[in-house]
């Protein structure tokens, strides 16, 4: 089974926020997913859009598929994963000499496309 992948590692947004838009497009055709994400206001939708476009580029490249590129209308999003990435840890001074930790989270966005005839 040919699965074409694209990964955005260390995306500067928490995984929880990107998962909200990832749940919208999981299982859709690739072109429908791009149309859906285009009208979403979230910043995570822009990141996911770029990763899907990269995976489509991998699938339509003849070098990646033995000289037989796939059409965009045939590709389905079978693997959309948003995993937590490394965190920047900062300290915020608080009252009476104490400190609170601030975690600036990041995520890894993984998209896998599969042609519909191979599912």
Image: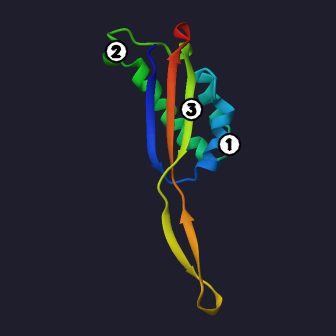
Q: How far across and how far down the image is residue 40, in percent?
A: 67, 40
Q: How far across and how far down the image is residue 30, in percent?
A: 57, 23
Q: How far across and how far down the image is residue 51, in percent?
A: 49, 36
Residue drawn at the location 65% of the way across and 89% of the way down: 95
Query: Looking at the image, do the residues carrying marks 1 and 2 touch, with CB atoms under 8 Å apart?
Result: no
Q: Nearer the viewer, residue 43 or 13?
A: 13
Eyeballing the image, is 45 above or below 24?
below
Element carrying mark 1:
helix
The residue that label 3 is drawn on is 80
Residue drawn at the location 63% of the way across and 37% of the way down: 22
Quadrant into which the C terminus falls: top right
Gap in angstroms between the C-alphas marked 1 and 2: 33 Å
**Which numbered disc, 1 or 3, marks the residue that appears first in the sequence?**
1
**Which numbered disc, 3 or 2, marks the residue that appears first in the sequence?**
2
Left or right, 18 with reference to 68: right
Residue drawn at the location 36% of the way across and 14% of the way down: 65
Left or right, 75 with reference to 27: left
Mark 1 Cα shell of 10 Å, populated few (<14), some (14-19), many (≥20): some
Mark 2 Cα shell of 10 Å, populated few (<14), some (14-19), many (≥20): few
Gap in angstroms between the C-alphas marked 3 and 2: 23 Å
Q: Nearer the viewer, residue 33 or 93?
A: 93
Residue drawn at the location 58% of the way across and 23% of the way down: 31
Q: Please identify, in this view, whether the residue under mark 3 or under mark 2 is nearer the observer.
A: 3
The disc label shown at residue 62, or none: 2
Element carrying mark 2:
helix
Element carrying mark 3:
strand
The residue that label 1 is drawn on is 20
Residue 21: image quadrant is: top right
**Which numbered disc, 1 or 2, marks the residue that appears first in the sequence?**
1
Query: Looking at the image, do the residues carrying marks 1 and 3 touch, with CB atoms under 8 Å apart?
Result: no
Eyeballing the image, is 102 above or below 60?
below
Query: Looking at the image, do the residues carrying marks 3 and 2 touch, with CB atoms under 8 Å apart?
Result: no
């Amino acid at each position: 089974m040919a699965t074409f992948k694209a990964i955005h590692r260390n995306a500067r947004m928490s995984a929880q926020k990107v998962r909200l838009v990832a749940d919208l497009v999981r299982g859709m055709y690739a072109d429908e997913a791009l149309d859906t994400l285009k009208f979403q206001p979230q910043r995570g939708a822009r990141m996911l859009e770029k990763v899907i476009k990269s995976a489509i580029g991998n699938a339509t490249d003849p070098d990646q598929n033995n000289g037989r590129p796939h059409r965009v209308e045939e590709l389905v999003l079978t693997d959309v994963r948003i995993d937590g990435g490394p965190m920047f840890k900062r300290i915020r001074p608080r009252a009476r000499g104490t400190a609170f930790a601030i975690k600036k989270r990041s995520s890894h966005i993984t998209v896998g496309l599969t042609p519909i005839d191979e599912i």
